[in-house]
Each structure stands twice: as C-alpha cells, then as structure tokens.
Amino acid sequence: MTGLPPSGAVLRAYLTRSFLSRTLLCAAILISMLEILGLLEMTTPILERHLGGMGLIHYALLRLPVLAVQTLPLSTLIGALFLLMQMTLNSETASLRAAGLSTRRLLILLLPSIAIISLAGIITQEFIAPHTEIALAKWWNKTDPEARSDSHGFWFHARGNVVHIDGFSDGGRRISNITLYHRIPGGDLVASDTAPEMTYDPTTGWHAASVRSLLLRSNRVDIEHRTDIVLLPASVTPETLIQLSQNYPVLSFWSLWAILHGHAPSSLPKATYRMALYAPFTLPISLCAMLFLALPVIYIPPRTGTRSLLPIAALAAGFGFIVLQGLIQALGNAGTLPASIAVMAPPVLAFLLGGAWIVKMEEK
C-alpha cells in the first residue's frame, strides 16, 4: 500500500481544511479593509456621476480580483500563524511531536494547502483580474462626462511606430488628438500623421476623418492633408488602448508573451513586462516562503502562551519580506536588476532566514 497511512491522510485533511479556512478569513478581512479605503476615496466621484449605490457595488466588485491577488501572500502568512499558534497553545503540536511528527513532515503536510492557494491565485491573476481591470477602466471612462479633457496623454509602441494620444472617451472607442510617428526598421523617423479625432471600427480599425501628414525627404519636408484614413489597425482594440493607458496594467501570461515576442503594442519598458511574466511562476514560491517564516511559532513553549514574541517576530519577518520584494521588484521593473534575479532574490532570502531560524529553535 502506497502513500500516507490513514492517520496521515486524516491529519493532512485536517491541516489543509484548517489552513484554508483561516487564510480565507484573513483574506476576507484584508480585502474588506482595502475596499473600504478605496470606497472612502471614490464615493464622492461615483455619486457625482449619479451612479448611486449600484455604482459603489459595481466598483467594489470589479476591484475584488486584483485585491485578492495582492493580499494573498499576507493572508497566507497570517493564516499560517493563526493555525500554528492555535495548535501550539492547545498542545496539539507537542502531541504530534511526541507521536514522531518532525518539522519537515509538518511542512510537507501543509504544502497541499499552499498548492490550492497558489492555484486559486494564478487562476485569478491570469483569467479573472485582467478582464475585471479592463471592465473597471472602461466603465469609469464611459461614465465620465469629461473623459477627454480629464485624460492624461500617453505614449506606446505599435508595429515599430511610436504613438502619442492625448485622451480617449466612450470606453476607449474614441481617441482625441493622436500623433503617429512612422519609423523604418533601423529606427529613423520618416513621417508623422496627426489627427484631431479617431473612432474605432471592429472590422477595419481606427478611422480618422482628417489627417495632417509630414513626410521627411532628403532636403525638405512635405505636408499633406488626407481624409478618411485608417491610422491604427483593428488589432489595437479599445481594451488594448485602456491597458496601454494604465501605469501597471494587469496582463495575462499570453498577453505579456505577445508583447515581448509577438510585437504587440506596449507602453512600458520590456523589463517591466518580463517581471510581470514571471509573476504566476513565483507566486507558489512566495507563499512557501511565507509559510516558512511562520513555522518558528511551533516552538513557543505552551506555558509562555500569548506572551511570546515569536508571532510578532514572524509577522514582522513577513512584512519585511513583502517590503523587500517590492523594492527589488522596482529595481527589476527599472531594468537595474535582471528579471530572474529580481523575482527570485526575496524568496531565497526568506528561505535562508526561515531555515536558520528553525535550526536555531531546534537547537534550543
């Protein structure tokens, strides 16, 4: 007979169920706090647009997937601390140790929970969050009566050309003040097109009623005025435009791959997209690092109880990991560090810290 004995299977099921329930509770609390803070900031603009209570609910629901992914590491850390502290203070850990359960075996029994949480996070990050982010930005743009005047200009690359847009409205289907700079494969500028307005047609692309073109010759500049011109292809959809206008859009793996290797439109440095490309693969490692930092609380003496400082130290280590991860990821986004080093350095440091901490507690 292979696998765990019946008692091991029961223990694994108990730990998985307990870990998941506590992590879910912590995630719900953290997400609720972030939703409340977001609504405090956005309630007045939403009500000024006469969207009412349904607008507040709509806004909160569309932000939910992104907040869930953002709070996942901290929820895992706090959930693990709650579970392990409760087991330790109730002498369950001491009983399991007396029955021969080692720290390594306990860690292995908790890994299925990490796998389930990671799978849920990856599914949310890859398939749900990108669509809800676009839906939120599109809804916010459509309901803004002054979308064009309030929009901030942005630049992006499309098929080797450089594009600047002053603003857009109607959920990204109407562009105001666009300038398209044409470049040859070597990068030299050869022409530019300027249009005061463009509208989107799903079959043919972006149409401009009037276009002013500048053509660079060897010894002069020719100016032309054209009408009913398609400046951008249909592949640059309103959803693509909304993504390009965001500072750090939530993109799926395939969208990032198309940007890095398929010449899809992009508005950020390649290093930023490489960092985002690795995110789904590093999520399980980061969650394992959080579990590793929470494990030392099993060494709390039962008589010490809640007076022990180990839980506070573990929580501080988890917060430090999140801050360090953010700082190193910023270096990776800027291209200062290679993306592979920037995404792996924080978990490796967390594993080293947690391992040294556990060894020291074992020696005591």
Image: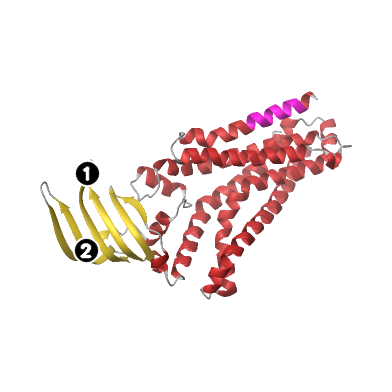
Number of marks in the image? 2
**Where does the magenta region start and end?**
351-361
Q: Which residue is mark 2?
A: 211
**Numbered disc 1: secondary structure:** loop
Tell me the tag on residue 29.
none
Residue 97 appearing in the image? yes
The residue wearing badge 1 is: 188
Question: What is the C-alpha distance between the residues marked 2 and 1?
Answer: 21 Å
Residue 280 screen position, x and y as percent: 52, 44
* Local crowd size for mark 2, using a 10 Å CA cut-off: few (<14), some (14–19), many (≥20): many
Up-down relation of residue 186 to residue 39 (above or below): above
Where is the N terminus found, in terms of image quarters? top right
What's under tag 2, amino acid-wise? Val
Q: Residue at x 77, y 37 (%)?
A: 310
What crowding class fits label 1: few (fewer than 14 Cα within 10 Å), some (14-19), or many (20 or more)? few
Which comes sooner in the sequence, label 2 or label 1?
Answer: 1
Residue 163's x, y, as percent? 30, 54
* Residue 4 visible in the picture: no
The answer to whether 243 is drawn above or below residue 352 in the figure is below
Q: Is residue 131 left or right of residue 185?
A: right
